[in-house]
Image (cartoon, helix red, strand yellow):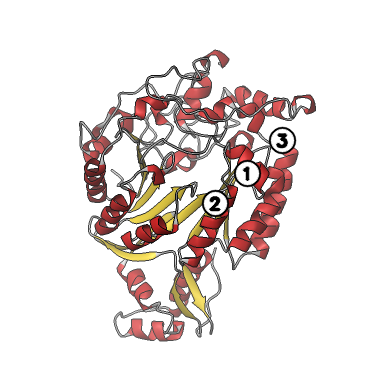
Amino acid sequence: MDRPFGMLAELTYACPLHCPYCSNPLNLADYKDELDTEEWQRVLSEARALGVLQLHLSGGEPLQRRDLVEIVACARGLGFYTNLITSALGLSRRRAEELKSAGLDHVQISIQAEEQSLSDRIAGTPSYERKIAAARMVKEMDWPLTMNVVIHRHNIDRMGRILDLAERLGADRIELANTQYYGWARRNRAALLPTRAQLDRAEEVVREARGRLRDVMEIIYVIPDYYSKYPKPCMGGWGKNQLTVTPNGNVLPCPAAHTLELPRATVRESSLASIWAESPLFNRFRGTDWMPDPCRSCDRREVDFGGCRCQAFQLTGDAARTDPVCHLSPDHEIVAEVVRTANQEENRDEDELVPRVMTVRGSNLPTADISENERSMS
Amino acid sequence: MSITVQATNRPRLARLVRLEWDNVRESHVLLAPEGVLVLNRTGATILRLCDGERTVEEIVEELRTKYDRVSGDEVGDFIGKLAARRWVVLGDG
């Protein structure tokens, strides 16, 4: 069996931003009972023994954890490459210096757009100025910096200016990743999905910038999979390279896999090694034996692994079907219809972005009318 | 993808990567923000010599004192591939 290389540690789902494309679960109240410092230290130790080398500290906003410095120090002591994925809200000079001393290797800061009013509007809170100040500080402290921008209909036409900003800030890498339609983002899909004309222009911008900035900055651009011919090779294969641990200790093959109807696996009941090797959750879609046609007989079955299980479930109600994004999928019409609608001029700009609303413990879900899967569509 | 490497380049590891020993895989590994490269013994030896001081030519010479068959082209290609991923910086020749 393969050993995992990377672990996404979702330390908390608490977050000061209200991004309409948030991919965290809808029912955040279920995740309030967070792992404590000692539990995370045990999980890190088990992860290293299992072979994990890269630790992505994420959330929500990981800076909301008071013990973040302790967690980073523990991780570096175990030999991980540590990557902080942050909104930068809460990254004071003092906190940054503590994290640097603890050995944090790399910082990834999100911005929502290249200018204040739009960035703040998408984030749902005044944040742009603090993010830019934090990015400057990270560079002053001689840290490697990745800028991350989630791309959608409302900022895709600004990618040239976003790249200019990243260059001015001295970012080592920039990720321009189109929205993935999971969690809250699914609710805003109609308002977020760009048109084909927008995508064509964006690709031209990326091509030009990659040539011009080849020696300056790495540019990662992810197109929306709704527009691709083949599905994304989700997580590089189910239970193959990566795992995710949620704030309350659930272990998942991918961050969206909590939506699937498979038995829960948690570090509070089992070791990470036994979950990785033995749990039904990790074994259900491992390898290629589970595949239906057209995947089973497809030359690309080891290239894209049948696409995303969570998207197959979300769109068809059956996680074992071919990802409907694939043009060979018998369910492809579901995706084709969404793309057609996004490209009809009369539908443009009618859809309002719904900002992420944070639930408080015990409150009713604000999204009780939205199901995380769309069985009714199939 | 690979970048052409000159014998006079003085390669060094990029600031954002770390060369480590992984006691689980019992291999050297190169750790980067979005990737891990598991190295064989030769690869690890080459990267340890990429200190920004030695030229590619000197690295090849040093490897020849340790290993029987060392192809300068293969060493250059290995370094060039990592340079294309920005994991190695080719210092001025």
Q: CA distance from mark 1 to mark 2?
A: 10 Å
Q: Amino acid at mark 1?
A: Ser
State the image quarter where residue B66 is shown.
bottom left
Residues A79 and B79: in front is A79
Q: Residue at x 65, y 50 (%)?
A: A114
Q: Are marks 1 and 2 on the same chain?
A: yes
User: Distance from label 1 to label 3 (Cα)?
Assistant: 21 Å
Disc 3 chain ID:
A
Query: Residue B81's spot in the image, x, y percent?
Result: 49, 66
**Residue A287 location, x and y as percent?**
37, 36
* Residue A64 occupies quadrant: top left
Residue ID for mark 1: A119
- Which mark sits nearer the N-terminus, 1 or 2? 1
Q: Do badges 1 and 3 share one subunit?
A: yes
Chain letter of mark 1 equals A
Position of the N terminus of chain A, as image quadrant, is top left
**Residue beneath label 2, please?**
A131
Measured as percent of width and height from the top left, residue B2 is found at 54, 67
Badge nearest the viewer, 2 or 3:
2
Among numbered discs 2 and 3, the one appearing first in the sequence: 2
The amino acid type, in three-letter code, at marker 2 is Lys
Q: Which residue is mark 3?
A: A195
State left or right for residue A369 relative to residue A347: left
Label 1–label 2 contact, CB within 8 A: yes
Q: Chain of mark 2?
A: A
- Please name the residue shown 57% across and 22% down the image: A331
Q: Nearer the viewer, residue A327 or A218?
A: A218
* Mark 2 vs 3: CB contact within 8 A: no
In the picture, the quarter occupied by the C terminus of chain A is top right
- Indicate the amino acid at tag 3: Thr
